[in-house]
Every structure is written in structure tokens, then in C-alpha cells.
Image (cartoon, rainbow, N blue to C red):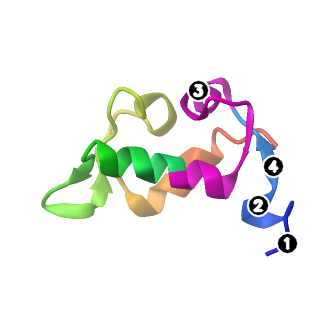
């Protein structure tokens, strides 16, 4: 995929996502990668159903406080992408 398009396009981030990422712009690919790294490093997947994510205090401002499916992750992140 060409740089600057689709998953590689630089986007503006919400304040909550900026706090998590440590910068005000990023690509969707970088955002997804960093969130999954955090999920794996902090063992935030339901042990009985690894497709379910249990947000911690760090991810709660972005993903909400309730358990969510990994398939809903993109939708929740999209709510924090401003452009």
C-alpha cells in the first residue's frame, strides 16, 4: 500500500489517543500495533476467549471500560481518529 493512503495515512488523534500514543498524529497501522503490544504485554485478553479484550486503566479512555471483541477494536479506535 502506498504511503499516505489507507492504513498508512497520517491522522489526527483525540486527546485520549494522543496521551496513549505519545504524539498527536499517527497512522492507523501504528495505532493498532501499539494497542496490541499493550494488550499482549499486560495480558488483557480473556483467558477463556482470547478474542475478547479486557481494557485496563490505560486503554479505558480509548476503548471504554467493558470487555470488547477484538473485532470491535477498530470501531472504538476510529472514534478517536479526528481526520
Q: Residue 60, relative to residue 11: is it above or below? A: above
Q: Earlier in the sequence, mark 3 or mark 4?
A: 4
State yes or no: discs 2 and 1 in contact (Cβ < 8 Å).
yes
- Snapshot quadrant of residue 60: top left
Residue under pointer 3? 16
Residue under pointer 4? 10
Residue under pointer 2? 8
Q: Which mark is residue 71?
A: none
Of helix, strand and loop, which one carries label 3?
helix
Q: Residue furthest bottom?
A: 1
Q: Earlier in the sequence, mark 1 or mark 4?
A: 1
Most common SS among magenta residues: helix
Q: CA distance from mark 3 to mark 4?
A: 17 Å
> Residue 2: where, in percent of width, then height?
85, 72
Query: Which residue is painted at 85% across and 65% down in the image?
Result: 3
Q: CA distance from mark 2 to mark 4?
A: 6 Å
Q: Which residues are magenta?
A: 14-33
Residue under pointer 1? 2
Amino acid at each position: 500500500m502506498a504511503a499516505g493512503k489507507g492504513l498508512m495515512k497520517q491522522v489526527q488523534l483525540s486527546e485520549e489517543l494522543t496521551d496513549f500514543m505519545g504524539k498527536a498524529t499517527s497512522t492507523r497501522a501504528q495505532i493498532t500495533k501499539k494497542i496490541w503490544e499493550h494488550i499482549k504485554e499486560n495480558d488483557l485478553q480473556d483467558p477463556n476467549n482470547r478474542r475478547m479484550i479486557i481494557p485496563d486503566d490505560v486503554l479505558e479512555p480509548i476503548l471504554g471500560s467493558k470487555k470488547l471483541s477484538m473485532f470491535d477494536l477498530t470501531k472504538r479506535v476510529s472514534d478517536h481518529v479526528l481526520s
